Image (cartoon, helix red, strand yellow):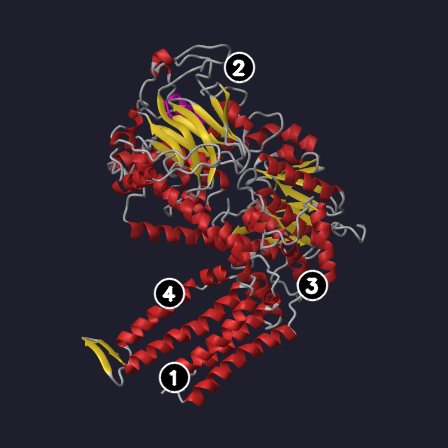
Amino acid sequence: MASAGGPRPRAGAGLRAEGWGWRHAGREGWAVRGLDLVIEPGERVLLLGASGAGKSTLVQAFAGVLGGVDEGHEEGSLLVDGQPPEGVRGRVGLLMQDPDSQVVLARVGDDVAFGCENLGVPRDEIWRRVGLGLAAVGLDLPLEHPTAALSGGQKQRVALAGVLAMRPGVILLDEPTANLDPAGVTEVRDAVAAVVRDSDATFVVIEHRVDIWLDVVDRVVVLAPGGGVLADGDAATVLRERGAELARDGVWVPGIDPLGGRPVRSARPGAAWGGPEAVLLPDGLRESAGQAPRPDAATPSTEPGSSATAVPARRGELLLSGRGLAVARVPGRVVADGIGLELRAGEATAITGPNGAGKTTLALTLAGLLPASGGDVIAAPVLARGVSGSRRARRAARRRDARPRPTRSATDAPAPAPRIRSSSELLADPIVWRSRELLTRVGTVFQDPEHQFVTGTVRGELEVSLRALKLPDEEIDARVLEVSGRLRLDALLRANPYTLSGGEKRRLSVASALVARPRVLLLDEPTFGQDSRTWAELVRLLAEQLDRGTAIVAVTHDRAFIDALADQEIVVAEGAGALAPAKGGLA
Amino acid sequence: MSSTAATDALTPPRGAQAIYRVNPVAKLAAALALSLLLLVTIDAVSAAVALVLESVLFFWAGLGPRAFFRRTAAIWIAAPLAGVTTLLYGVSAGQSYLQFGLLHVSDGSIALALATVLRILAIGLPAVVLFATIDPTDLADGLAQVWRLPSRFVLGALAGMRLLGLFFDDWRQLELARRARGLGDTGRLRRFANQAFALLVLSIRRGSKLATAMEARGFGGDTVRTWARPSPFGVKEWLLITLGVVIGVVALAAAVVTGSFNFVIG
């Protein structure tokens, strides 16, 4: 039994599913079917299974939030402590992925108190539990602190404190770290581990990154995609016996490399550029990819992967560069400055650094989506060829040029004089290009795929840029088929993009940028929360693009991704805004 | 990077002045009582009297002059505009000064214009000043605990307001995404409509996720809810409401005594 004083949940509740199944309203297939599962009070379970195996559906059902008969069709029985979940509100606490929708109220204290209020806990007791809950997740913040000012990891911990304050008998976590950067993942994991250690509550977590939770759980259950349980037992046994199978389904199994230990780049740094004839074209992609790089620039260097290489290992053609860049999300509020970088054909650049340092803002500035606050984004003539720009954007750029340009540290330099750019100089700045002109030159994949969906079908998403380019119908059809086949979207062409799974949404967002064949591709956290299968597919696909001569820039925290692809790493430092190429130096 | 404007709106700094500690529900009631009384008549005298009495209270409200004029700017603009319109098109009576097509400036329309300007100020200014010091969370507490409005509705709206803050960020993202997807060259109006629809879709999706999260924390169950924050309603609150009523009544009395009372209906 939990001590009465602590923030501990009461004694754990048992969970039981008997021949249970659920079909969402309007769907033909069952999300879960024929499931028999017993989780004893106090057990700590990691729930695995391929994407679409119904893991989320199951925990939502246990939490009693799946909805009634209008939301779907249920069969079999599902019990918490021997009762239907709807009847034991408060016995089950649930924490889900998206930090923004886990927080309910505007202040930290009020938010933690919210669950207790709903359960009718007396006022004095509520505030006692709020204090204990926040302490249990290691948050030392004033109760008045605005929840809008919290980081993603902090939001998840506040929500967890709110769950704990309800003293649930079961704590269910549905990929609580999927939307967090590595620091946030560790932060939330440690908070959960501490809570689970001190509590008698039953604990179930869904997560495809097994290593995060391995120390916390004592049982692993794998759901089969068609329904039922695929494997069940202690973590070591299940991973030993089913590891390879799980990895194939997208689970990150410790010790199994999703890429199978093979390098994905046909010409890694160190190897000289092989020339167009050596370029590995993916099946079906037969278009000659861009310009051949300057052979004279290919300078063989020391061994592959060496980060001590002083001479750039392999240089393709310069496509886009930034000089003395100052970037600002909101005009005038510079988040990083003094940035210089060069993007070359067939080379991958990783932009790394702590949260809030301005990585995304830098990427969006390079992408011609945000105007630079200072310095220049310059497209090489080969990239800028053929653009006429939009008149309004040119006028806006001239107006910005005429104003003194703000820098972040106003003290250390005299305000630069207004500058005057010639027409051709102006046209080298992607911010003045027409939206349509950007498509084939600089493509952008946003961090949240939902932000970039503009139509109601997957096919529509893939076609929309091609229609903007006014390509003939046959060409559009051919390209859509090619890219959708390549990214396993061909069966989903008529589906609504919003109804796709996380991995499918990511693949679609990448596909819809690639379909226009941009020379430079920018991706913002492309691998966040992805299962290992999608991850490996993305890495391979991007490697192919590099081989075709596309320049790739990725804002990322993902070390494995960087190791697999990047030729150079640019670190955007917090505060200083200074940059240091950390790999394969292209300063 | 999430919008600070929205943060401020949901968690405004709580000032030290007495007005910040008055239950928001009382502020609502006071503003409502005053407006209803002032809407009975349309004449310059009652509005002027009310405005003079109110201006004494504005100092007490705890907004500095800068904050006061910044927050009430819309009313200072709207009032004269309404005045000019009334001046030009209002009911004509007495001496006529200017006539040009439909425009007709006369004694009657001048008096009516003056009354309109003063009335908008007399009703609008105190309302804005009172509402400016309302914390949305406190308001929800008051509506549910003092006025006994259904907590489901009140708290749902409060939680929804938090999502409004994400609108600004979403809108900017959608704008950039449309440019990146090659849709940035079409007409502005069409793009706006299209983008507004996308924002709606995003909001509904986020709203339903939030609803699930709230439900998971026991919201909407059968248990009688308790409240972590008390919402006291006592002397201060009654005093404010009384002040609102007194100002209204004094203003009306002044109008009746001076003979300028002008009943709105009829």
Whole-percent x and y of residue A309? Answer: 50, 14
Which label was assigned to residue A120? 3
- CA–CA distance between discs 3 and 4? 48 Å
Using the rendered image, report if marks 4 and 2 lie on a common chain. no
Describe the element under mark 3 as helix, strand or loop.
loop
Which label was assigned to residue A308? 2
Magenta-highlighted residues: A540-550
**Residue occupied by mark 4:** B77
What's the chain of the residue with tag 4?
B
Instruction: Give yes or no for contact between labels 2 and 1 (Cβ–Cβ under 8 Å).
Output: no
| First-in-chain label (4 vs 1) | 4
Looking at this view, name the residue that lies furthest to the left: B101
Left or right: A357 as drawn, with respect to A378: right
Decide which of A93, A523 is in the foreground and name it: A523
SS majority, magenta: helix
Quadrant in the picture for the C terminus of chain B: bottom left
Decide which of A547, B34 is in the foreground and name it: B34
Whole-percent x and y of residue B156? Answer: 55, 61
